[in-house]
Amino acid sequence: MNDHDIQNRFEELEAGRILGDLDAEEIKEWEILSRDPRCKRDFSLELTAAAVEAEFLQSRQSELPQNLKEKLRTGITDFVVPEPVKVDSLPAWRRILSAPQFAWGIAATFAILLVAKTFFQEPQSVQPVPLAGVALPPAEAKSQLMRKASDLKESDFGGLTDYGKMTGKVIWSDALQEGYMTLTNLPVNDPAVKQYQLWIVDPKRDEKPVDGGVFDIPATGTVVVPIRNPVAVSDPKAFVITMEQPGGVVVSKQQVVVAIAKAS
Amino acid sequence: MQQCITQYSGLVWSIASRYLKNHTCVEDVVQETFTDLWKSANRYDPTVASESTFIGMLARRRAIDFVRKESRRPQFEPLPDAELLPYSPTEPTPFIRGESGDVVAAIKDLSEETRQIFFLHFDEGMTHPEISEKTGLPLGTVKTRLRRGLIEVRNKLRHAESGEAAQPSISINS
């Protein structure tokens, strides 16, 4: 291949990377080519993908839920003084860049990140840090789901072997793709040594269980843990909790199965 | 920043919802995207990309990264940090403002088949196997059409925005 062919091949792989469709062989090839000085990289394909996506989504843009909008606004206004007047003619981004408080904002980056961190430590938004169970009284989110979901399914967890004293329930809504586990008497774990991991059995999607997220039990008693399914799940047949290495695993060997909830 | 939230939160929410089905995960991605905005604000260059394109890219990165982390697929390389924009590893990024009219025109210029695949992927949010099943096209063809279509749109946007002759580097019909 000449330089032109190599650049073309790299561009095609780069497009695949941005579209998220590289297979294992292509990933290796991309890694090699990305280090090749003959391959030029820039952000143009990624920007193009974003522009195309924004264009298609323009007609179906939905409104941000009010509670999230408030959360964002509250988090930000804690650190932003009122903007100066007479900047309406500038685009929003220019306004940020030209506002006097922006210089202060840069200096306060660490403080802002602290706020963001605080944000993400709230019960519903702790990924990618493993989930911590939410101490009862029941999380507002779970109550909300119970109020708004019309297709709620509920199953009981049964603890296995060493976890026989454990009890719990799982609620799940296919329509909202949201669910929560309420777990009682699950032993406290040391996240540095081992962590709990949820698996969702959805035969319609895959024969292998879908990863439902890693979580910790920080204290004895009852905790509510939100389910995090990165891919859509429909009509799950069972929920399985296993004990895994810190960070969880891609495929569980099911050496320690803690509890199972079968759909009724 | 308040205005950014007002103006672009719908876009960020829609992008996150396209990649993630779980409501809680979508909320996380929206929050992380706006935190990224804070971190990247001083690096944003309006001559390289429009606000919506830039913010759309941040949201897209966050959502895709989230899916990768959650599904724990092997990672080949994390996307470069948004705050590096507009500085690229090897080349300066040519401007891709992504103005709506230019994007629409570039998509319209695609072949009928590629346009349909674009619609199914970017609008309907279908996966490649789903597109393959719906259209009857082999999976490899779907992948190739999408990739090359993206490159073709990029080339057309460069052409439209710079006035230079488009340099299609890959034949779309091959």
Image (cartoon, rainbow, N blue to C red):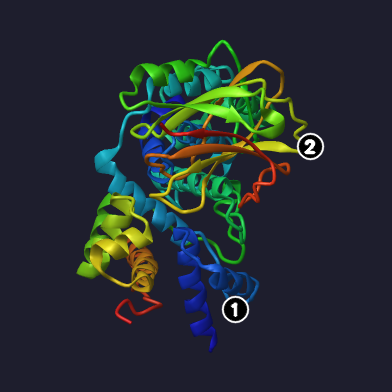
Q: Mark 1 — residue? A: A38
Q: Compared with residue A23, is residue A103 higher up or lower down, i.e. above or below?
A: above
Q: Is residue A182 visible?
A: no
Q: Is residue B132 visible?
A: yes
Q: Nearer the viewer, mark 1 or mark 2?
A: 2
Mark 2: secondary structure: loop
Q: Is residue B69 left or right of residue A180?
A: right
Q: Which mark is residue A192?
A: 2
Distance, label 1 to label 2, CA atoms, is 44 Å
Q: Quadrant of residue A110?
A: top right
Give neighbour class at mark 2: few <14, some 14-19, many 20+ (Cα, 10 Å): few
Pick the front one: B48 or A22: A22
Give neighbour class at mark 1: few <14, some 14-19, many 20+ (Cα, 10 Å): some
Mark 1: secondary structure: loop
Precedes in sequence: disc 1 or disc 2: 1
Total numbered badges shown on the rendered structure: 2
Q: Quadrant of residue B73?
A: bottom right
* Residue in the image at 51% along x and 52% along y: A208
Q: Is residue B112 left or right of residue A258?
A: left
